Image (cartoon, rainbow, N blue to C red):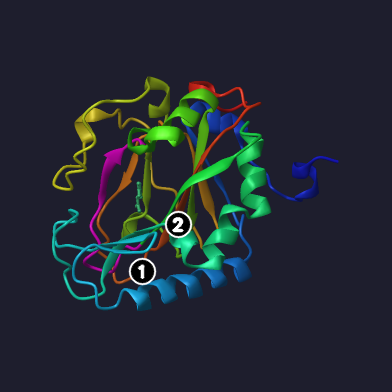
Amino acid sequence: MSFDERVAGVDVDRAAYVRDGYCVVRELLAARIVAALHAATDALEAAGRDFVVDTRVGPVFYEVQSASGRKREPAVAPGVLRKITGPSKAQPAFMRLKNEPRVIAAVRALGLTSPRCVVDQVNFKHPRVGTGFPFHQDAAFLHGDAARALAAWGGVNVVVALDAADAGNGGFVVLGRTHAAGQRDGQHSYDTSTMNEAMFDGTHRAVPSLAPGDVVLFHPHLAHGSEPNRSDRRRRLATLWFVGGAGDGGGERTGP
Ligand SMILES: O=C(O)CCC(=O)C(=O)O
């Protein structure tokens, strides 16, 4: 019996992933796992409660929420965070998430048989002050060994909803099918004053409504982003970027 067959009930729409560059898996994570991630997120936020500028704590990088959303600008208030990079290096629940059998099974179902997580993050989008993310392709932000592995073996990225997320609270926006056009230049400035809308084809734009524990699996070349959180609801999500290894046949063609 294979690893994936032992992980019951992971049902991944491979055809949608190939066609659209993403697919949604409902209830991939059990409520107890989401609860552990909430507790871990609370602990990380407590550790950063006095931060007014972007701050590194050992291997963990805290980016504060500035008024514009740009990095290296002051926080709108002490301890209001936009993103933490490397939460798994401080919180065991996030380390377990990288190795969670149902997450690994979902990634493997898309053809990445030897997945290795090279980036993990938690994104906060606080009510009323959380800014958007301009459209971009994650592959453009990988460097060194991880970028080489992605080019050689392919990759699959994962967004995990920690709160309910939808168009009303700055939910995750995908520009379906843009993965097929390959990587675009000019997205590194990450200027939050523009959504980079002119750079990508928005014909198949979608904002999947997600419940806590739902995930979006997406191709590293799929353009995606999100709007500001104009609501009174929290919107936190975790991201994991996997690259393949020897035996994966992927590169640009990652997937079945
Ligand atoms: O948090 C979001 O809405 C978007 C996240 C994202 O695309 C990123 O962190 O690269």
Q: CA distance from mark 1 to mark 2?
A: 13 Å
Residue 130 belongs to the span the image colors magenta = yes
The extreme right residue here reads: 1
Residue drawn at the location 37% of the way across and 21% of the way down? 181
* Residue 66: x %, y % from top left: 17, 62
Tell me if residue 222 can be seen. Answer: no
Label 1 sits on a secondary structure element that is loop
Residue 144 seen in this snapshot: yes
Relative to 38, 78 lies left or right: left
| Residue 170 belongs to magenta span | no
Amino acid bearing label 2:
Ala
Q: In the image, what residue occupies the spot 45% across and 65% down?
A: 163
Residue 7: x and y, percent? 75, 50
Q: Nearer the viewer, residue 239 or 63?
A: 63
Q: Any atom of ligand 1 within 8 Å of the CB at mark 2?
A: no
Q: Is residue 118 left or right of residue 70?
A: right
Mark 1 Cα within 10 Å, few/some/many (few <14, many 20+)? some
Q: Secondary structure at mark 2?
A: strand
Q: Residues within 10 Å of mark 2 (few under 14, many from 20)?
A: many
Q: Which of the 4 quarters of the picture holds residue 59? A: bottom left
Q: Which mark is residue 136?
A: none
Tell me the chief SS of the magenta region: loop
Q: Is residue 159 above or below residue 114?
A: below
Q: Which mark is drawn over residue 234?
A: 1
Q: Which residues are magenta?
A: 124-137
- Give coordinates of residue 102: x percent, y percent: 66, 51
Q: Is residue 115 above or below residue 125?
A: above
Which residue occupies 42% across, 57% down?
86
Q: Amino acid at mark 1?
A: Arg
Residue 133 versus residue 72 in the image, above or below: above
Say which residue label 2 marks.
238
